Amino acid sequence: MTRPSLAGVHHVKIPVTDLPRSQSWYERVFGFRALFEFPDGDGVVRGVAGELPGFGDTLVAFRENASAAQGCQDFDPVGFAVRDRAGIEAWAEYLDALGIAHSPVIDASIGWLLVLHDPDRIELHLYSWESHGIDQTGRAGYGRRVGQAESGA
């Protein structure tokens, strides 16, 4: 039997504890624009979905779920792509101007990385498509190509 094909990523859903606070934060930081809202049976809107500039057709959704948001603290469920190191540095300057704490620019496994946290301490990664060419194979916690031995061979 032939495996059917996928057509990309439809949406990414991020759990939050306070929907209005998180929606406002993602609007301010990333330019999120809500297209859909999801009221529960009591009529209270506890979820939204919409667009993030640069995400193409992939929707981003936020859903109130306190236990899931707490479980995702200091974890990076999604990485946002940035073209190159200059783009990462521009994001660092932009976040500084907004007063949002972030890591320094990091030489990550393949490209450059900037780490920040949303209002629920969910870790967000801004990661460059551009590779830095640094061999991180022997560094604990850094990625390596599948099939490489511990020695990096």
Image (tube, rainbow, N blue to C red):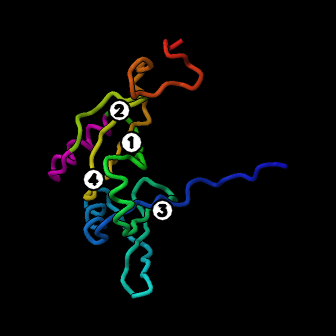
The quarter of the picture where residue 147 lies is top right
Q: Few, some or many C-alpha atoms within 10 Å of disc 3 (few <14, some 14-19, many ≥20)? A: some
Q: In this view, does 97 lie to the left or right of 136?
A: left
Mark 2: give few (<14), some (14-19) or many (20+) Cα within 10 Å: many
Q: Which mark is residue 121?
A: 4
For marks 3 and 4, give the one nearer the viewer. 4
- Which label was assigned to residue 82? 1
Q: Which mark's residue is nearer the viewer, 4 or 2?
A: 4
- Asked if the magenta segment contains residue 90, the reply would be yes
Residues in magenta?
86-101
Mark positioned earlier in the residue sequence (1 or 3): 3
Measure the C-alpha gap from mark 1 to mark 3. 18 Å
Amino acid type at circle 2 is Trp
Whether pointer 3 and pointer 4 mark residues with C-beta atoms closer than 8 Å, the reply is: no
Q: How far is mark 4 from mark 2, CA to CA? A: 21 Å
The residue lying at 57 percent from left, 26 percent from top is 146
Of callouts 3 and 4, which one flags the residue occurring earlier in the amino acid sequence? 3
Viewer-side residue, 88 vs 151: 151
